[in-house]
Amino acid sequence: MALARRGGGTGRRAGLRIQWGIQPPCGFKSHPRHHALRDLLHCRDGLSRGELTLAHVLEELYANIEKREPTIHAFLSLAEKEELLQGAEGKEATFLLGLPVAIKDNICTLEFPTTCGSRFLQNYRSPFEATAVARLKAAGAQIQGKTNLDEFAMGSSTEYSAFGPTRNPWDPERVPGGSSGGSAAAVAAGEALAALGSDTGGSVRQPAALCGVVGLRPTYGLVSRYGLVAFASSLDTIGPITRSVRDAALLLSLIAGHDPRDSTSLPLPPQDYLADLRPNLAGLRIGLPKEYVPKELGAKALALVERWCMVVEELGGAVLEASLPLTEYALPAYYLVASAEASANLARYDGVRYTLRVPANLLAEMIAQSRTLGFGPEVKRRIALGIFALSAGYYDQYYGKAQRVRTLIAQEFQKAFEKVDLIMGPTAPTPAFRLGEKADPLSMYLSDLFTIPSALAGLPAISIPGGTIEGLPFGLQLIGPRLSERTLLAAAWALEEALR
Ligand code: GLN
């Protein structure tokens, strides 16, 4: 592709509107994105102006749930419509006025069990709730239910849930992505207005991309991890999955800010990311790393990327060639670091604490049998890999080396951001794949190729709908420097409007 410095410049903000020819899939009357309710902010404004009632909003959502949920299976637990109606009483003075938000089931809630999609925690009820959840509730949100995920958030398709897979609302033969597949599918299917997911190596952005919605991974440390069940603590983040960039900014405003209960929480006050947010790309330098547009993406995906570049320039930005040569080492480094941390974090599931226990005569036997029964194959694979990477004699060769690669990747991004403001590329290499299609672990891991490097570097990144390939959504990812959420959201909003 001809990606040498293009014209760019400012002030060429044409009223560009590209028709992507989005067709409603799987027999839905209207495409999820064209749903009458639009987004959370739209509903909030409608409620506060008296143009909409909560009963009306809930009726729409629950009509969709009744129709689609038996196929989609986005929720592991779900509030009744009537409960939410009653629960809204007394919330008249709050910002969200009792509107419901869905929560990924590895984020602790008091109202519902927190299963992490694992047999181990099938009936587990957390005695406390996550800070992000408490903050949403304080802002007047109600917890609509808990959404399906790959067991302990390890996976990219939601097929590894112990409670059955979630299906993609665009095509139920296909996966919604993962691990926050339930959250993304619920939002895309019109079953939820907005949701929280978790992103360790891409689990908010990749399912958002595959379901045609918006997913934001915040800067590591910006949103408290307190109450997020630990997978890989140095990578785990909580992020919003929404129908619009503005909703992502809204939810981020509500959940971000310092929390003394998370030692890695950044000492920053909460911010209003919506205040003075304008769709804006003027004057921005957008880097397109050649490693993010390999020819293996195929002609259709490359054509979409080419159009994104045109749109950036139409909106007054400049597309610059960039290079992140260490990209190919990110995947192996991630799977060593994340698995090493997972093996330590998941040691707590021993049959003594939490819910599942296989009785046996000897303690060691009880622990072994509980873990054998409680964990699924992917979780076992990660634990085995992690323990190996951390074992004496191999520690430096694997874990130590992966950590050094991680540092180099972070430095490489830092250097790239001396020349560009944001980095753009596809969120995932392909649109949604079929259930069962990626049976070997490596081909599954490869779907996180473009989300993992920024996760290793702790950077914020957002996925927005970037068009469709053969009727399936294809996500556009923007990555920014640490704490660049304002720039990221403004640019994402501008692109969202132009690409809609
Ligand atoms: N799919 C990646 C993995 O399996 C990322 C998961 C995540 O971000 N939680 O590890």
Image (spheres, rainbow, N blue to C red):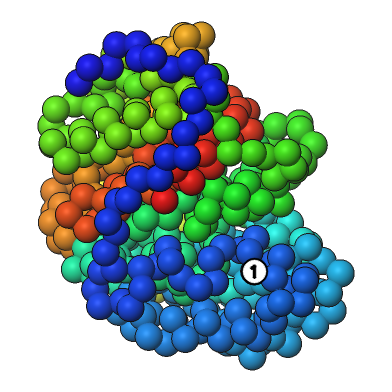
Q: Is residue 287 above or below residue 19?
A: above
Residue 373 locus on image (x, y percent): 31, 67
Look at the image and tell me whether residue 23 can be seen.
yes
* In the foreground, 172 or 376: 172
Which residue in the protein does label 1 denote? 43
Look at the image and tell me whether residue 387 can be seen.
no
Q: Element under label 1?
A: helix
Residue occupying image coordinates x 42% and y 40%? 16
Quarter location, residue 181: bottom left
Q: Is the distance from the Cβ of mark 1 to the nearest ligand 1 atom less than 8 Å?
A: no
Residue occupying image coordinates x 76% and y 31%? 267
* In the foreground, 307 or 462: 307
Image quarter of the N terminus:
top left
Return the residue found at the far bottom. Answer: 82
Quarter location, residue 109: bottom right
Residue occupying image coordinates x 58% and y 74%? 144
Amino acid tagged 1: Cys
Q: Is residue 168 above or below residue 304?
A: below
Residue 195 locus on image (x, y percent): 54, 61
Residue 32 locus on image (x, y percent): 40, 68
